[in-house]
Amino acid sequence: MRILFLSIFFLIFITQNTQAQDLNSLKPYILIVQPIVLQNNKGENPASINIPKKLINKAYEKAGISFRFLEPIYFNNTKARDGKINLDKIVQIAEKQKLIKGQNDIVNMFFVNAVDGNKGPLGRAKMNGNLIFISLGENKFKSYEKYRNMQAFVIAHEIGHNLSLRHAVDDPDVENDIPNIQGEGEFKDRINPKYSLNEYQINKILKSPLIHPRVKFLSKKEGEVAILDESFEPYFSNLQIREITTFINEEVPHKNLSKARDFARKKFQSAVINFNSKEKEIITYAVNEVLKTLIKNNISLMYNHPWRFIKVQSWLCGGFAHTRGTYIILSQKYIDRLIKGWDENIDKNLKSDIISKLGGLLVHEQMHSLQRTFKSSFDKLYLNYWNFERGKVKTEKQIELNQVSNPDAPIPEWLIKNEKSLNEFYWVRTLLNKSPKIPIMGKDFQDKVFIVERFNENFKVKKDLNKNLISLELSDIVFYKNSFPVNRGLDHPNEISAYMFSELFKALYLNKEYISDKGKTNTLSFLNWIDAEMKLN
C-alpha cells in the first residue's frame, strides 16, 4: 500500500529576522524526533541537517510541547539521498536496515537532498503518521537568520501533518490569511507563537499518539507493545534458551531457538500490568525532584529526556529494573520496596532518603535510555576518557549457550586493554552457572574475563593447548577493578556509567561530596565528560 504524504513546496523570498529565546521552563508534553540523514553509498556527503531547535520549540510553545531531537543516525544510499527512489521504497529499505525507531511513538525524519527528484526547500509528511522527508536546499537568503526561519518552518510544518494538521487552505477551522504553520505568510511569522497555532489546532495535536506527557505511565496494552521494542538495538532476536529460562523463571517448551524467542516475547508481554494511582503519584513526585536537581546542575541531556515507565510482574527478570528502547521497566516488587513507608505525613529525612534511593534508580535507568539515543556521546566517554577498546569478538558456542544478555547493555563490544600486552585484551562476559535447570537471576550469574587477541579486523578468544577458552576471574584484573569508584556493573561501561551517575545524583541531591580516592582518575574524567556532553542545550 502506498504511503500518503502531504507535501509543501515553497518559493524563497525575503523575510524579517526573528530572535530565538531560551526556554526557561520544561513543557508538560514531549515529542520525540529521530533524525535520519541520507548520505552516499560510501558514507560520505550527507544531506543538510540544520535543525533550529529553539525556533521549532517556539512554534509549538502555546501547545506546551517540547521537542526531543535524538542523535542523528546515518543511512548510506546515494539514490535515496538524491530523490531517485520513491518514498515508499526508501521507507522499505530503512525498515529492512532497522533504521526506523520507536513503536509508532517517535517521528522518524529523513533528511535528503531531494524528494521524488525535487530539490528543497521541500518537505513531505505522512498524515497522522510518524514519517517525514525534509530537503532544506541551499541558503539563498542574504541573511543566515532568514534561512534558519525557513528551516524551522519546514520542519514545524511537516511535523504538523504527522500530528493530523491539514493545510490551512483545506481546513475551514484555520484562517489561511493569518500566519500559521499550516498557512500563508512570512516564515518568521508562521513560526511565531503568537500566530503559529490556533486553539483548534492545539486541541487536535494533543490527541496525537506522538505527543507524550513528560512523565508517562504506559497502560498494560501500551506496555505490551513497547516491551518488545528492538528498534534501537537487538534483544529478543539474540536470546539463547538458557537465559530465556532464567528471565521468565520457567523451562522453555521449545528446543527450536526461533520458537523459544517467540515464546519469550509472549511471556514478557504477559508480565505487563497497570500502575495504580499511588504508584504514579510517588514516582511522578520522585521524577520531579530528580528534575529539580538536574536542572540546578544544568544536566540538560537528561532533564530534556522523556520519562516513560512500564510496570511488570515480579517474576520477570527476577524483579530487576531494566530498560527497553526509551522505556524504564519497573517490577511490582521493586516499586513496593522503593515506596515502602511513604505517606502524606512522612518524616522529612525519611522522605529525602526515599527520594535519594528512588531517584538514584531512576537516573541509572534513564542513563541506559540515553546510551541508546545519544550513542556517540557515550562512545566518547568509553573510548577517549576511559580508554576502552571497541571490538567484535568471534562467537564461541560455549559462551553463547550460557550467556546473559543484559537488556541495558546487550552488545558485548567493549574490551579492556591489557597494560602489559598491546595485542591482548580482556573481555568480560556474564555467564550462567551450568548446573541449575532453571538458573536464578543474579544468584546463578558469574562474571568471567576472557583473554582475547586481534584477529584480522576483529577479535577472538585465546585457547590453551587443549583448545579450552582461557579465562580469569574479574577479581584477577586488579588494575581494572581499582580504576572505577563502583564495585557493580564492571561487566560493561554502560553499567559503569549508569552506576556512577546514580551515585553522583545522590551526592548532588543530598549536597554531599562525590569524589573518592578509588577510581579518582576515571571519576574526574567522568565529570569532565558530563560537562562536555550532558550539559549541552
Image (cartoon, helix red, strand yellow):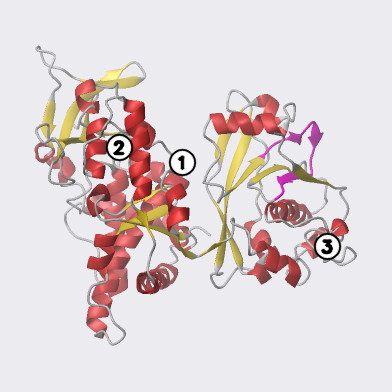
What percent of the width, then of the height, locates residue 374? 46, 47
Q: Is residue 326 visible?
A: yes
Rendered position, 15 above or below 452: below
Image quarter in which the N terminus is found: top right
Asked if the residues shown at circle 1 and circle 2 are in contact, with their CB atoms under 8 angstroms apart, the answer is no
The residue at the far right in this view is: 177
Q: Is residue 390 visible?
A: no
Which residue in the protein does label 2 denote?
388
Q: Nearer the viewer, residue 315 or 401?
A: 315
Identify the residue at horizontal 31%, vertical 72% (top origin).
509
Measure the C-alpha gap from mark 2 to mark 3.
Answer: 50 Å
Q: Amino acid at mark 3?
A: Gln
SS type, badge 2: loop
**What residue did someone put label 1 on?**
232
Q: Is disc 2 in contact with disc 3, using a CB cutoff of under 8 Å?
A: no
Q: Give the spatial CA distance, label 3 vs label 1.
A: 41 Å
Asked if residue 395 lies left or right of residue 166, the reply is: left
**Up-down: is 30 above or below 110?**
below
Residue at image location 36% in from the left, 50% down from the top? 323
Residue of label 3 = 16
Front residue (pair 496, 349): 349
Q: Which one is earlier in the sequence, the residue at label 3 or at label 1?
A: 3
Q: Which callout, 1 or 2, points at the residue further toward the start of the chain? A: 1
Label 2 crowd bin: few (<14), some (14–19), many (20+), radius 10 Å: some
Task: Residue 27 in the image: state x and y as whole percent.
Answer: 56, 69
